[in-house]
Image (cartoon, rainbow, N blue to C red):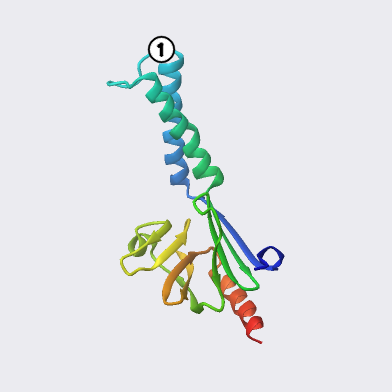
């Protein structure tokens, strides 16, 4: 397959942009930094039942540094329309891109949906109706039927995504 030589007709990169998520992530990180500096560096126990310095150091590395870097720095949803289909990658969770070939797509439509009601939130989700979602924020997306499996791809520009899919899949069928 010549995936590297294909033309990218549409590309959307979405990142976390909700202020409340930034506040939660940074709040946890700040708390871990304060605990680490206070207990490990200054020798003052952190909390009413402090853990060991090693435990606090592990939590500091995970939640004071790793968690913010992953959530605010690396986390992104990349959607591309190429010559042969729709490519989706949820970085850093997907090691390789998910490909939905036009030949396998039965239908697709732009729609507004409620991520919490329909999928229990954002991210890579599956609901009780066996629908799968790739979303990072918002309530707009494109629902595609791939060989009978319903897949919701979150998008800030769902109408444009559908227009490009129409144009590219139409060119393939001509």
Provide residue 137's location: percent of width, then percent of height: 47, 56
Residue 82 vertical placement versus 53 (above, below): below
45 or 55, which lies in front? 55
Tally of marks? 1
What kind of element bears circle 1? loop
* Quarter occupied by the C terminus: bottom right
Extreme residue toward the front, this view: 1
Which residue appears at 38% of the width and 64% of the height? 114
Relative to 100, is 121 on the left or the right? Answer: left
Which residue appears at 45% of the width and 34% of the height? 62
Residue 77 vertical placement versus 102 (above, below): above
Residue 116 vertical placement versus 151 (above, below): above
Where residue 43 sits, quadrant-wise, is top left
Extreme residue toward the left, this view: 49
The local crowd at label 1, few if under 14, some if 14 to 19, many if 20 or more residues have their Cα within 10 Å, is few
Q: Which residue is tagged 1?
A: 43
């Amino acid at each position: 397959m010549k995936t590297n030589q294909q033309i990218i007709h549409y590309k959307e990169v979405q990142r976390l942009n909700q202020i409340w998520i930034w506040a939660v992530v940074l709040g946890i990180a700040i708390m871990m930094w304060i605990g680490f500096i206070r207990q490990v560096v200054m020798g003052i126990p952190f909390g009413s039942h402090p853990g060991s310095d090693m435990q606090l150091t592990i939590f500091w590395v995970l939640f004071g540094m790793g968690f913010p870097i992953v959530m605010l720095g690396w986390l992104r949803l990349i959607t591309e329309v190429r010559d042969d289909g729709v490519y989706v990658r949820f970085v850093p969770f997907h090691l390789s891109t998910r490909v939905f070939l036009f030949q396998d797509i039965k239908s697709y439509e732009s729609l507004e949906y409620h991520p919490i009601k329909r999928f229990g939130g954002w991210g890579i989700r599956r609901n009780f109706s066996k629908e799968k979602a790739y979303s990072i924020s918002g309530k707009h997306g494109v629902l595609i039927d791939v060989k009978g499996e319903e897949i919701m791809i979150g998008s800030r520009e769902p109408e444009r995504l559908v227009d490009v899919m129409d144009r590219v899949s139409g060119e393939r069928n001509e």
